[in-house]
Image: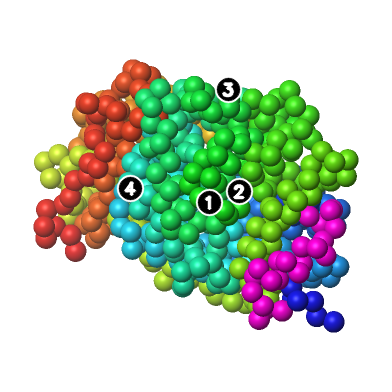
């Protein structure tokens, strides 16, 4: 007998209505949890494999960590789907992923591109400000994800970078709400693919972090207890909502609230994932969002991250038990709890009458409908490993990504028209692969013998002690005196083209004053940079945020206010161009 929910000719509403009453309480509770799983040598980064969570907790949503080959990823996906298909109801697995198409390598936020096409960070796409390019980027991400079975993008990150010290800025589209709104809408449309609605050839976007994770007190991140407070001294709460309104209008079907807790806003001072006024009052009732709300990871239980014990990110509700926290999440209006595998915390309250099963049904209905929309019950249950090898990192995808790297480079200074370079000047390089640079010109090892030095720098930060914390580059944005002295000594020895990777708005007034050339980069390989230096491509980027003139200016700034400085080192939107006819 074929049950109605297995019939693809029926409407999604009919299929959900048929499947829901066939589910046990345990089936429903398992659907409400979304945890990490690994691949290859690290199949159980949380101590459990996806297979174990499927069997023991009846879960079917997993965030894939790590990067295998395209074939390995496709085969893992198919194995999980085979196990799911063999269960009583055959509810398919949904695999999600953090971003994996750029240069960031942080196990808590994004993965290096690996086999996928490599693009600038989203900051770089914002610097280009080309809606069609971002839509095409989303489409290429969609096709590469589909090939290996990734169906939910835990992105785009549409927070606004109004606090320069915040560690998550590189994943944003900058500090301007209108620019971010344009980029977010185009990216979501690219991930959705053909058609006006999510379908079997789509990747669902989980936009984050509602209601905007940028206004962090002192720029600290709420992954950690010292960064739990989100503050709005400038009164710009509504400004940070603009990109989410645009994302909802563009068809986003999933939203993730952040860890932070609002302070001094009139809302309950608890983390956004526990916050009924934010999720139900603001997101669902005021903004009209009826899609899936999935909390950020690890709100309920203390546990290990990269071998270190970390407290649950239960800001404002630290006194509650894990079960009480789970109930507060559901009463707030969230549908899914990220980074946890403990459905028993929901089953028991339903059994003893503290939680109505109808409340679970509302969330299960949303989650099942998404699986049906994505075709996971039908043609999209399995993927082709051979096709995955052909599609992921395809040459034309890489070409477009590398062109975007070049376009994103933002020229801040070009004194005396040094660029573009011509002929074969002698170059001294630091932070650039000499073998790559030698493809373009003659390399010397003594800066005093060079016609020009090329120096690549990273944005400064204050190292933190914990292993997991060390991946979050926060704190001061200026170089310490010893390092600054070394840099300036080179700049005084030879005209120098400085390129600084802006994962945050660096404070570099002395460097800007004494360099010959200054570029901002947001993820660009050495060849992309050298192509622009030698005029084989033109820089087209413009700053997606202000660059502050001093740390004192940063310290007195209000975390929620965009473009606040009246005298920045470089303003939002600054970016020079080469003279006409100076590039090939």
Q: Nearer the viewer, mark 4 or mark 3?
A: 4
Q: How is the image coloured?
A: rainbow
What is the spatial separation of the Cα atoms under label 1 and label 3, in whole angstroms? 31 Å
Residue 569 lies in magenta, yes or no?
A: no
Q: Is residue 472 above or below residue 530?
A: above
Residue 21 lies in magenta, yes or no?
A: yes
Looking at the figure, which quarter contains the C terminus? bottom left
Looking at the figure, which quarter contains the N terminus? bottom right
Q: Which mark is residue 226?
A: 3
Q: Which mark is residue 179?
A: 4
Q: What residue is shown at x 29% (from left), y 42% (from top)?
A: 543
Q: What residue is shown at x 46% (from left), y 69% (from top)?
A: 196
Residue 220 falls left or right of residue 547: right
> Mark 3 and mark 4 in contact (Cβ < 8 Å)?
no
**Residue that label 1 marks:** 289
The location of residue 51, given as percent across then percent down, is 80, 58
Span highlighted in magenta in the image: 7-28
What is the spatial separation of the Cα atoms under label 4 and label 2, in whole angstroms? 24 Å
> Mark 4 and mark 1 in contact (Cβ < 8 Å)?
no
Q: Would you call the spot at circle 2 few (<14 residues within 10 Å), some (14-19), or many (20 or more)?
A: many
């Amino acid at each position: 007998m074929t049950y109605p929910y297995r019939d693809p000719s029926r409407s999604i509403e009919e299929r959900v209505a048929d499947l829901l009453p066939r589910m046990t309480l345990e089936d429903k509770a398992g659907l409400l949890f979304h945890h990490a799983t690994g691949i290859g040598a690290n199949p159980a980064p949380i101590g459990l494999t996806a297979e174990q969570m499927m069997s023991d907790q009846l879960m079917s949503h997993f965030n894939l960590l790590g990067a295998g080959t395209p074939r390995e990823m496709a085969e893992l996906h198919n194995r999980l789907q085979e196990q799911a298909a063999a269960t009583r109801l055959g509810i398919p697995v949904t695999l999600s992923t953090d971003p994996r198409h750029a240069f960031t390598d942080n196990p808590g936020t994004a993965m290096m591109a690996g086999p996928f096409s490599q693009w600038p960070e989203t900051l770089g796409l914002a610097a280009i400000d080309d809606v069609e390019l971002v839509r095409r980027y989303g489409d290429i991400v969609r096709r590469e994800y589909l090939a290996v079975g990734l169906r939910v993008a835990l992105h785009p990150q549409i927070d606004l970078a109004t606090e320069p010290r915040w560690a998550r800025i590189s994943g944003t589209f900058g500090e301007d709400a209108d620019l971010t709104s344009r980029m977010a809408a185009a990216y979501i449309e690219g991930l959705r693919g053909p058609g006006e609605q999510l379908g079997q050839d789509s990747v669902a976007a989980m936009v984050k972090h509602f209601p905007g994770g940028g206004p962090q007190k002192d720029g600290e991140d709420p992954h950690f207890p010292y960064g739990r407070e989100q503050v709005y001294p400038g009164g710009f709460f509504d400004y940070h909502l603009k990109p989410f309104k645009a994302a909802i209008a563009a068809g986003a079907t999933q939203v993730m609230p952040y860890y932070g807790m609002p302070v001094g806003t009139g809302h309950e001072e608890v983390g956004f994932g526990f916050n009924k006024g934010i999720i139900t009052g603001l997101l669902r009732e005021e903004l009209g969002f009826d899609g899936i709300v999935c909390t950020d990871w690890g709100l309920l239980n203390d546990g290990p991250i990269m071998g270190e014990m970390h407290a649950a990110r239960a800001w404002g509700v630290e006194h509650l038990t894990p079960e009480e926290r789970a109930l507060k999440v559901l009463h707030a209006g969230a549908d899914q709890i990220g980074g946890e595998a403990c459905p028993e915390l929901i089953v028991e309250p339903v059994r003893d009458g503290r939680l109505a099963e109808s409340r679970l049904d509302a969330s299960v209905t949303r989650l099942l409908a998404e699986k049906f929309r994505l075709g996971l019950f039908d043609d999209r249950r399995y993927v082709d490993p051979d096709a995955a090898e052909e599609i992921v990192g395809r040459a034309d995808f890489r070409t477009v990504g590398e062109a975007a790297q070049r376009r994103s480079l933002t020229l801040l200074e070009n004194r005396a028209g040094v660029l573009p370079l011509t002929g074969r000047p002698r170059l001294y390089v630091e932070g650039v692969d000499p073998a790559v640079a030698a493809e373009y010109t003659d390399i010397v090892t003594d800066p005093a013998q060079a016609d020009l030095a090329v120096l690549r720098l990273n944005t400064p930060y204050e190292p933190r002690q914990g292993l997991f914390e060390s991946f979050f580059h926060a704190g001061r944005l200026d170089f310490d005196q010893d390092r600054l002295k070394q840099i300036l000594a080179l700049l005084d020895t030879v005209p120098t083209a400085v390129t600084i990777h802006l994962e945050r708005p660096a404070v570099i007034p002395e460097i800007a004053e004494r360099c010959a050339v200054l570029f901002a980069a947001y993820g660009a390989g050495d060849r992309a940079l050298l192509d622009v230096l030698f005029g084989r491509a033109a820089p087209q980027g413009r700053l997606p945020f202000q660059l502050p003139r001093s740390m004192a200016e940063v310290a007195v700034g209000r975390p929620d206010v965009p473009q606040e400085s009246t005298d920045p080192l470089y303003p939002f939107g600054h970016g020079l161009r080469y003279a006409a006819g100076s590039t090939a």
